[in-house]
Amino acid sequence: MMEFKDYYKILGVDRTADPKAVTTAFRKLARRYHPDVNKDKGAEERFKEVNEAYQVLGKTEVRARYDQMYEAYQHGGGNWQELFGRGAYQQAPGGWTVTYGTPEDLEDLLGGAGGFSDFFRQFFGGGVPRGRPGRGRRGAATVPREEPRTHSTLDISLEDAYLGAQKSLQLQGDGTERRIEVTIPKGVKSGQTIRLPGALDAHDLYLTVNVRPHPQFERRDDDLYVDTPVALADAVLGATIAAPTLTGKVDMAIPPETQNGQLFRLRGQGMPRRDGGSGDQFVRVKVVLPTKLSPRERELFEELRKHRTDK
């Protein structure tokens, strides 16, 4: 029997946790185990596991489906696997179903970290009982043809919102299929809508954008915030550090006696704006205290403590 994944336990939240608590727990763990920050053995796998849990618990309708399986599992029922595919995005009679067009698009939709468990892949698309119509993967949405304005949602990464992107959508209905390309404009925000004129038999399709939370960067309007570790000696004496941005690391000078939690502004490194400008990025210093001191290092700290005490 396939191993059941307890995503609540993985994120360290209670089943009654509200969406904000789930997101907060995800961000805390993702920052802790992100491969760019944590080089410990096993950190990358833990990061993937945390990311996988958030893809399920971070969406209300997906979480509700998972909770059905969770209940069956908790009560000792061996039939929880039978719930794979049930109640997920059923296709209305005579309607269209919108899905991502390629495995690569699906991988991006599900977080881009890769390495998903068999449970997760089965939950989002495998093991669907035959003869049941309209089961789709996450991101699929039922679109009735008779509606002149039809809506679906489009999940994208923060990188997609920053750089802009092209997404492939597969439209299926009445035995026919068509693929359309969606242009993601730079700087798009969650809740904004992309209009696809005539996408559904002369009917317009409206895609409401949802920008997924990022494990490192926090977006506030057009500005970005990110924590970066700084060695104690660099914070005390001043240094040039490598600050992360969405397009790679850049050199940033910090002055002597930089304090833990101090913010530094990188102008123009935030999200693109419609007027052609960009927001700013704020780098928050997280001073890392040294561990496993050598005898000489401990001696130097003792001298420093004595000197500061005498002073």
Image: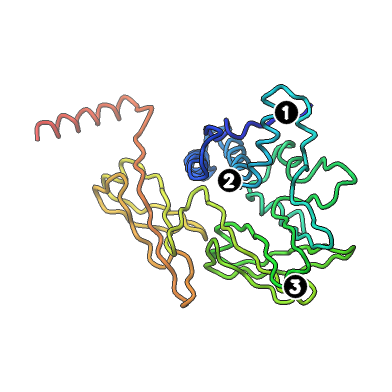
Whether residue 38 appears in this view of the structure is: no
Q: For numbered disc 2, what is the local secondary structure?
A: loop
Query: Residue visible at 70% across and 67% down?
Result: 150
Among all residues in the image, which is located at the extreme left?
Answer: 311
Q: In which quarter of the image is residue 210?
A: bottom right
Which numbered tag is attached to residue 3?
1
Residue hosting label 3:
199
Q: Nearer the viewer, mark 1 or mark 3?
A: 3
Question: What is the CA distance from the residue labelled 2 to the residue labelled 1?
Answer: 21 Å
Q: Specify the amino acid type for callout 3.
A: Ala
Dot 2 and dot 3 residues touching (CB under 8 Å): no
Residue hosting label 2:
58
Image position of 10 (left or right of 217): right
Dot 2 and dot 1 residues touching (CB under 8 Å): no
Q: For numbered disc 1, what is the local secondary structure?
A: loop
* Circle 3 residues within 10 Å: few <14, some 14–19, many ≥20: some
Q: Position of residue 212 (x, y in %)?
A: 57, 53
Seen from the viewer's position, the closer of residues 305 and 297 is: 305
